[in-house]
Amino acid sequence: MNNQQILIVEDEHSIGEVVSLYLRRAGYDVTYMDNGEEALTFLKTKKPDLVVLDLMLPKVDGWEITRWLREHGDIPIIMVTARREETDSIAGLEMGADDYVTKPFSPQELVSRVRAVLRRAQPAGQVQEEAEITLGELHINQNQRLLTIAEKEIPLSVKEFELLWFLMSNPRQVFSRDQLLENIWGLSQYIDPGTVTVHIRRIREKIEEDSSNPRHIQTVWGVGYKFEP
Ligand code: CA
């Protein structure tokens, strides 16, 4: 799977780090920078799928980065404004930002905005089919990289997500650890099959907390796993 890349530019480290963490958990590749100068240099050679941009930054501010981005393409921008005043947010949208959040905001709220903006940004004709599976109380959506149990969102790492997606795509079918390694990680000869065991354990822990049936992922003969709806 090809992960979408997000650049976060934010000089308040506590915010930058929490936002990075939530976006990584949501399955995005995150690059985090704390000043505008570094961000501009980065943007001159790289093209992330979306930029989360604080307005008040040292050296080069968010306005200047927005101006530069709009002169050089259409990378979606979500602005982070510190001020209560609507004027900054509106000016930001007029300059070409796609959305904005006002501090303080919840990281989960920002993740939802990122998803929405990225979906809107997909060129017409390339909009992917909704790829989703519902098995009992578990609902998994591949485009949004989202697992919900009874409507509650369960955060998964990229590999945990891919592993669960694979098992749920083939319910009741047993796969050995080597088969799962090959399908999810690819280069199985370089990775210990124990990796699969560790990831299965983490998924189970996350599912068990919120599921009425903790035995969705079953171990078969000690060598493989299957998903039981
Ligand atoms: Ca700031």
Image (cartoon, rainbow, N blue to C red):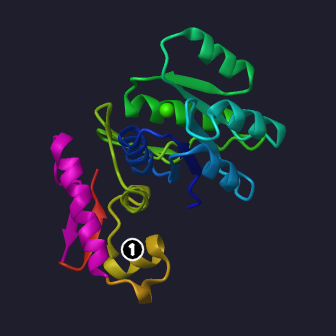
Task: Give the residue number, with chain letter if any, for mark 1.
Answer: 180
Q: Which residues are magenta?
A: 193-221
Question: Is 108 displayed left or right of 33 in the figure?
Answer: left
Q: Residue furthest top?
A: 86
- Asked if residue 183 is positioned above or below residue 56 in the image, the reply reads below
Look at the image and tell me whether residue 139 can be seen: no
Q: Compare residues 119 and 147 and report the one nearer the observer.
A: 119
Residue beneath the point at 70% across and 57% down: 46
Residue 126 horizontal/vertical position (percent): 74, 44
Where is the N terminus found, in terms of image quarters? bottom right
Residue 54 placed where, x, y %?
54, 33
Magenta span contains residue 89: no
| Quadrant of the image occupied by residue 139 | top left
Q: Is residue 194 magenta?
A: yes
Q: Is residue 193 above or below residue 152?
A: below
- Image x and y of residue 41, in percent: 69, 54
**Farthest residue, direction bottom:** 189
* 149 on left or right of 124: left
Q: Position of residue 33 (x, y in %)?
A: 52, 50
What residue is at 31 percent from the left and 73 percent from the top?
A: 196
Comparing 160 with 171, the one in front is 160
Q: Is mark 1 within 8 Å of ligand 1?
A: no
Residue 201 in view of the camera = yes
- Asked which secondary structure carries label 1, the reply is helix
The residue sitting at the right extreme is 71
